[in-house]
């Protein structure tokens, strides 16, 4: 195994790994500060913050020969015998000077800057900067300029790391951002008439190590140190990007991509990033309601009553169930169990799968899926446990129209409108219709029972993405008062004691399914590939 | 003028010397025809290596050795880039060659392309040379018509096209990888090395970048022989195994406060004093020289006492300068304030820094800001320390930048502060009697900012 020596400590790296000094040092627990380097972008080695001393240890004699100057850690490969020194006076002085230089043209308006608290310039200044300011002070100036519909640029806060420019060239392939002017008068800008307007634009804000690029959606909404973050999965499409939901007091403020080499690498799309506002929409359903007249008037009900009355009303019916691909695997499995306990011959269908356009693939490989739901694969895997044949939403509508059933239970939970009056008309003939949804709809108007559903950040459980990768997550926030997440309702309808425990349900599922057997164990933050696990297990 | 015969400048003053028939009448292109008929590329490389020719662009890297870094038996194209983005202040030797003897350059390019097996040569010309542009394009057209360029040159099976590219004028385009980026149509931000251009250069293919004067020297080596070339100049220092010697004639650009400024051809190793006195007719108006730039502003300064330094590739380095550079000797007479000189130098580099690396982008701007303040009568002794620190930490040599521009910006600062410290102190104390000792950070003076 190749050995790298970081500040005197030897660490081993993989024989075929291609690491730079920053990555190798990180393995040894040493953080080399850097601005311009990002693992998902090309190396430019221009910020010069990661300068370190390097050398080589002769394998035969053990003699160490140092390079007589500083080298950028991002650009220097770590090989067998590479010696990296990150804490010498030369290195520390160099970092202090880079920090000092970056602050020459920086307004230092942290008090009104959105990035304060998660700003690398701030952090590194406290860690590596020098206490005294020696440069000529500049008059305060902080120009703001729009670069696109989602992103705004605070021109003078920029440290010219060019991460954003490289992102639009290499990852989104749209190349809207550029460097204008030269030398210390350089600025990030867009060409007139060509704003930063692409489906991945929000990522440049995440990439910006300082407060130069601001997300208009988040700007001045919350100080970052009030935010708590929960590892979540985006429900916007079947890609299932790993995200962090950042929230405070049960309010989501922003979503950020979470590194996952198997799914989204470092990025997420704007559809997902800004696709949380429906959680706090004022027209969300907030209490269960039972229709009391044909005109659609509803009286509110208590959840504990719902648990018993629902079962009583559906008892004896021929029942069809639509299992929404917005539900988690656990919820889907419990709903199947609930349905079969009411009607042993209940027809279990995959719910409506919203599809919009075509898959959108970007040059670096990032793909936005046309299938706008996170868990079709997971629901299908559950349905295969109960049904010989997989039947979808259209089959269910046909069965309802043909009069094959007299009761239906439709789970939805889609963030936007999904069914129109014509689509919902066949459900008129049912004796009992249960609808669980985030918002009222043409179908909800016809429902005997209209139950509020939970949004993506309010659920806990497992989603299986388009590539059969299962990712588990906890709820980031509590649903609004009056809303029970679906899992809680099913758990109670199954007569189980205590609080809904997705983990216990997962273990049960794992015992009954070879496809989902791996869910019984510990799931890493990046998820597991069900097909690989199945091959390994089988 | 007691000099040896001029070789590189032989066409200067010759009527119509830039035309093909004049060049052929002086023996031009005959060596090329001979080489194409009789020699293999490897032999040409060996001859250039044996001649000891070092690149004339500034760094003085041995030309033949540079060519050998190209991958052997490379299946794809290899490119030769000719750097005519001559923007080092004080330098105009390439311009004379391109305007007065473009065929000499073109013959050198064809020979070098043959040696490196390049089938396309890109000549990157700075925008500000319209006359050179017309002359070069005229000469290239003549060479095509005469069969020295194009497909299957003179039946040798070797083909070459020369593309003349007119840059858009920025100092950084003269940095070899900056030039390559610019040729590719991008912003001229120097590339990180490795990979070096010989492995991955223009359009990601193996590339050699050479200077115009180097090309003229190559042409002369094949006209007059390796022995002739090695008979001129300064042999390698036996005490220094890393010194490959400084051979051949060199074009010195003499300007500033001299009686007869101009481009002079002299053997490498002539001293600065000899050049100024013999060729330039001495410092103007009978004054004394205060300082002399040995080879373009980025090389630093020689003091009056150091004028006997030989201007070969090793000489200026021995007295603390960066090197010979482009051999553009600029004389600064005793009436000039060294503070003004440094301000001018810093203004140039702050303007030309490409802005990629933090230490150069901010360091050049900061040093300019300090000098503007010093000249506005707000200097402090502490500024001298800060200038010295910027000078010693900015550049490729300490490792804080990608390219050598920052070294070029740092050297004048470093030399001026080290060699003329007393003058700086006097200036600051005289112009800022009340505040020269202050060490607090100073607020910027908006009124001082010139632009």
Image (tube, rainbow, N blue to C red):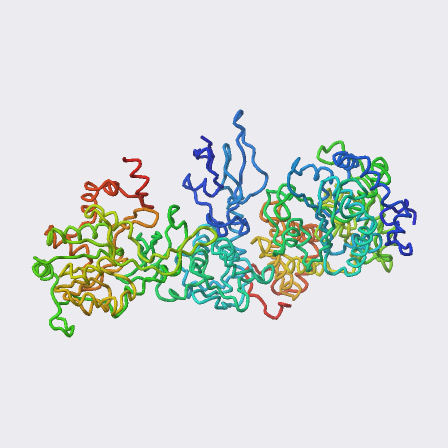
Would residue B88 be seen by someone viewing this image from the given angle? Answer: no
Task: Left or right? Give the position of B361 relative to A366.
Answer: right
Q: Quadrant of the C terminus of chain A?
A: top left
Task: Left or right? Give the position of B244 relative to A60.
Answer: right
Task: Left or right? Give the position of B305 relative to B195.
Answer: right
Residue A185 in the image: state x and y as whole percent.
Answer: 58, 62
Residue A120 in the image: state x and y as whole percent.
Answer: 44, 54
- Foreground: A405 or A333? A405
**Residue drawn 71% across the image and 35% down it:** B242
Q: How many marks?
A: 0
Residue A144 in the image: state x and y as whole percent.
Answer: 48, 68
Residue B134 in the image: state x and y as whole percent.
Answer: 79, 59
Q: Residue furthest front?
A: A402
- Asked if B344 appears above or below B399 in the picture, the reply is below
- Asked if A513 appears above or below A124 in the picture, the reply is above
- Foreground: A405 or B11? A405
Q: Quadrant of the N terminus of chain A?
A: top left
Quarter assignment of residue A31: top left
Quarter assignment of residue B133: bottom right
Q: Residue furthest top?
A: A60
Would residue B215 be seen by someone viewing this image from the given angle? Answer: yes
């Amino acid at each position: 195994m190749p050995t790298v020596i970081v500040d005197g400590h030897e660490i081993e790296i993989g024989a075929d790994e291609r690491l730079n000094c920053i990555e190798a040092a990180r393995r040894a627990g040493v953080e080399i500060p850097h601005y311009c380097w990002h693992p998902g972008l090309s190396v430019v080695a221009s910020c010069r913050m990661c300068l370190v001393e390097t050398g080589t240890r002769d394998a035969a004699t053990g003699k160490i020969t140092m390079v007589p100057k500083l080298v950028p850690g991002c650009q220097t490969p770590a090989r067998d015998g590479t010696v990296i020194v990150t804490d010498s006076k030369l290195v520390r002085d160099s970092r202090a000077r880079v920090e000092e230089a970056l602050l020459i043209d920086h307004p230092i308006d942290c008090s009104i800057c959105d990035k304060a608290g998660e700003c690398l310039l701030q952090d590194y200044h406290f860690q590596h900067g020098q206490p005294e300011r020696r440069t000529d002070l500049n008059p305060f100036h902080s120009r703001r300029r729009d670069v696109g519909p989602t992103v705004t640029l605070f021109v003078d806060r920029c440290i010219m790391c060019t991460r954003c420019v490289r992102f639009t060239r290499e990852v989104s392939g749209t190349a809207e951002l550029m460097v204008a002017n030269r030398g210390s008068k350089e600025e990030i800008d867009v060409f007139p008439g060509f704003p930063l307007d692409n489906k991945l634009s929000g990522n440049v804000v995440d990439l910006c190590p300082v407060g130069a690029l601001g997300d208009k959606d988040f700007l001045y909404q919350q100080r970052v140190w009030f935010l708590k973050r929960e590892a979540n999965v985006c429900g916007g499409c079947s890609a299932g990007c790993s995200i962090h939901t950042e929230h405070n007091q049960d309010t989501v403020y922003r979503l950020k991509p979470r590194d996952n080499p198997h799914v989204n690498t470092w990025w997420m799309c704007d559809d997902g990033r800004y696709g949380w506002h429906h959680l706090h929409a004022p027209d969300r359903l907030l209490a269960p309601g039972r229709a009391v007249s044909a005109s659609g008037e509803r009286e509110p009900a208590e959840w504990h009553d719902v648990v018993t009355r629902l079962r009583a009303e559906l008892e004896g019916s021929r029942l069809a169930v639509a299992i929404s691909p917005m539900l988690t695997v656990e919820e889907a499995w419990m709903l199947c169990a609930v349905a079969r306990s009411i009607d042993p011959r209940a027809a279990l269908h995959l719910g409506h799968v919203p599809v919009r356009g075509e898959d959108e693939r970007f040059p670096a490989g990032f793909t936005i899926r046309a299938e706008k739901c996170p868990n079709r694969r997971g629901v299908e895997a559950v349905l295969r446990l109960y049904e010989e044949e997989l039947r979808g939403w259209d089959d269910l509508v046909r069965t309802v129209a043909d009069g094959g059933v007299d009761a239906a239970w439709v789970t939805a939970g889609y963030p936007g409108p999904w069914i129109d009056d014509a689509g919902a008309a066949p459900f008129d003939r049912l004796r009992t219709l249960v609808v669980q949804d985030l918002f009222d709809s043409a179908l909800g108007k016809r429902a005997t029972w209209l139950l509020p559903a939970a949004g993506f950040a309010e659920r806990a459980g497992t989603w299986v993405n388009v590539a059969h990768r299962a990712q588990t997550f906890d709820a980031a926030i509590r649903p609004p008062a009056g809303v029970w997440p679906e899992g809680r309702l099913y758990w109670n309808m199954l007569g189980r004691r205590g609080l809904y425990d997705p983990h216990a349900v997962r273990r049960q599922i794992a015992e009954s399914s070879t496809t989902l057997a791996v869910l019984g164990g510990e799931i890493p933050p990046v998820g597991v590939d069900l097909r690989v696990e199945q091959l390994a297990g089988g | 003028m007691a000099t040896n015969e001029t070789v590189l400048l032989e066409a200067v003053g010759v009527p119509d010397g830039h035309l093909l028939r004049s060049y052929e009448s002086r023996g031009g292109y005959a060596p090329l025809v001979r080489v194409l008929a009789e020699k293999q590329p490897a032999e040409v490389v060996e001859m250039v290596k044996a001649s000891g020719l070092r690149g004339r662009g500034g760094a003085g890297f041995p030309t033949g050795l540079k060519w050998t870094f190209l991958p052997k038996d490379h299946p794809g194209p290899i490119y030769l880039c000719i750097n005519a983005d001559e923007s080092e202040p004080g330098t105009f030797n390439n311009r004379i060659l391109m305007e007065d003897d473009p065929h000499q350059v073109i013959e050198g390019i064809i020979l070098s392309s043959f040696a490196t097996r390049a089938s396309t040569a890109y000549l990157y010309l700075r925008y500000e040379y319209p006359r050179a542009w017309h002359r070069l394009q005229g000469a290239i057209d003549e060479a095509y018509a005469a069969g020295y360029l194009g497909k299957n040159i003179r039946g040798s099976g070797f083909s070459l096209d020369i593309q003349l590219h007119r840059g858009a004028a920025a100092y950084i385009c003269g940095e070899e990888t900056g030039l390559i980026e610019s040729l590719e149509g991008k912003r001229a931000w120097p590339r990180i090395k490795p990979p070096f251009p010989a492995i991955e250069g223009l359009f990601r293919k193996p590339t050699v970048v050479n200077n115009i004067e180097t090309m003229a020297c190559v042409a002369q080596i094949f006209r007059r022989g390796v022995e002739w070339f090695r008979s001129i100049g300064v042999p390698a220092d036996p005490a220094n195994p890393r010194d490959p010697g400084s051979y051949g004639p060199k074009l010195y650009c003499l300007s500033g406060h001299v009686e007869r400024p101009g481009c002079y051809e002299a053997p490498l190793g002539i001293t600065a004093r000899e050049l100024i006195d013999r060729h330039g007719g001495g410092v103007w108006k009978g004054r004394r020289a205060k300082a002399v730039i040995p080879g373009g502003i980025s090389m630093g300064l020689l003091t009056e006492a150091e004028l006997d330094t030989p201007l070969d590739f090793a000489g200026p380095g021995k007295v603390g300068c960066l090197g010979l550079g482009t051999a553009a000797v600029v004389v600064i007479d005793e009436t000039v304030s060294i503070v003004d000189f440094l301000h001018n130098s810093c203004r140039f580099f702050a303007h030309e820094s490409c802005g990629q690396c933090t230490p150069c982008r901010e360091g050049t701007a900061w040093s300019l800001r300090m000098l503007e303040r010093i000249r506005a009568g707000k200097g402090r002794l502490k500024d001298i320390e800060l200038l010295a620190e910027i000078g010693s930490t900015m550049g490729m040599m300490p490792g804080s930048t990608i390219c050598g521009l920052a070294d070029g910006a740092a050297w004048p600062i470093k030399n001026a502060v080290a060699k003329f410290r007393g003058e700086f102190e006097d200036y600051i104390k005289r112009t800022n009697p009340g505040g020269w000792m202050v060490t607090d950070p100073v607020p910027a003076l908006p009124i001082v900012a010139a632009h």
